Amino acid sequence: MWKKAIEDALNVTRRNIDRFEGRFPHVSNGDEHYVLNDNTEWTAGFWSGILWLSTEYTQDPRFHEAAVNSVDNFRRRMDQKIIFDHHDIGFLYSLSSKAQWIVEHDAAAKKLTLEAADMLMKRWREDAGLIQAWGRKGDVNNGGRIIIDCLLNLPLLFWAYEQTNNEEYRRVAELHALKSRRFLVRGDDSSYHTFYFDQATGEAIRGGTHQGYHDGSTWTRGQAWGIYGFALCSRYLQSAEMLETAKRLARYFIAHLPEDEVAYWDFDAPQTPNTKRDSSASAIVACGLLEIAGQLDEADPEREAFRKAAESSMKSLINHYSTQGSDTAEGLLKHGSYSVRGGDSPDDYTIWGDYFYLEALMRLERGIPGYWYDRQ
């Protein structure tokens, strides 16, 4: 099943190389076509990541050429300083230049990735003890704000520490992870999407949301970022506490899934026949569950339970949410949501959903784990 789904995804990707003509997909908008941009969105790295996964799986020169060209584009983006007033530098460069480093140990790719890590470090706010999610330093609304998504940007800093032995990368990443664990994870193992702190002192103000149903709800993609993000922090820090946090969030996610095991867009949104799903959240969680399982002892019963949960969800994604068999679809997964709350691509393709879907498939088929950390 996994191999057939991968081959179908590879066929879509081959067609997309020609369709996109060097541009980057973001989301669709009610049809089978991606909205493209010139590497200006926070999501551009996911297309590069798909190309590197395809290269690693097939060794096909066509995929490799497109993957290398995408990294060249990211080098131009760094030189031109295009839209870096957010924390998603890890999403951008972990799956592009860091992916090239992991696959090929290309020295120029390593240099570019370290430049990206330095760019992310500029978002560290020492007084508040956090990596600012959005906006410029001192921004009235966002100056002391974190979001759970940032956990997937931290691997860039942990990797930079491993490459340079500069403790500052690790210190910043660990402190931000600890703050996220303390304030974004609720006592019932659900999560806040975002949290606000006093910019001058770091004193906690309140939790909230940006894309969830309401401030106290659990936005499923946010929970997904937490599951995979804390699992990755556990791998880098060798932290039992971080791994347990990932497991807690995972148990909550699994327990609140509907019958077909693919998440609605928010666990607290009223569930009706018209309630939107977020297939991308379930694809992210599948990767997170497999990452957690890989860190557990073989004798631990949760190892197999988490793996089976990932497999079950992926089977549902393949059978009911994928575009398998279509010659015209540009996306791999249907029924992803960017922002249901904001009415922005609420039931569409999302390039991050496609990336994590393919990563999960390759983890299951060949143990290829994506590009969040170097392989041993």
Image (cartoon, rainbow, N blue to C red):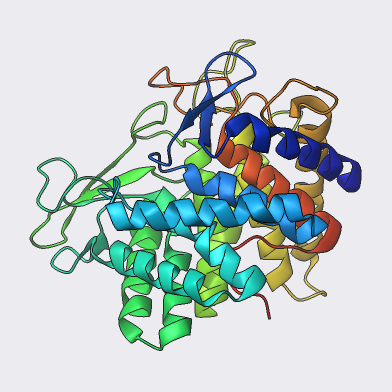
Residue at image x 42%, y 64%?
A: 154
Residue closest to the eye, 120 or 279: 120
Q: Is residue 91 visible?
A: no
Q: Is residue 59 left or right of residue 341?
A: right
Residue closest to the eye, 349 or 25: 25
Q: How many marks?
A: 0
Residue closest to the eye, 200 or 162: 162
Residue 138 appears at what percent x and percent y?
A: 9, 51
Picture quarter with the N terminus: top right
Residue 348 appears at what percent x and percent y?
A: 58, 22
Q: Quadrant of residue 79?
A: bottom left
Residue closest to the eye, 146 or 6: 6
Residue at image x 66%, y 69%?
A: 103
Residue 97 appears at what percent x and percent y?
A: 51, 63
Residue 19 appears at what percent x and percent y?
A: 64, 29
Q: Is residue 306 above or below residue 118?
A: above
Residue at image x 77%, y 39%?
A: 9
Q: Is residue 293 visible?
A: yes
Q: Is residue 326 above or below residue 96?
A: above
Q: Is residue 345 left or right of residue 145?
A: right
Q: Is residue 219 left or right of residue 48?
A: left
Picture quarter with the C terminus: bottom right
Q: Residue at the bottom extreme? A: 165
Q: Is residue 191 left or right of residue 337?
A: left
Q: Quadrant of residue 179?
A: bottom left
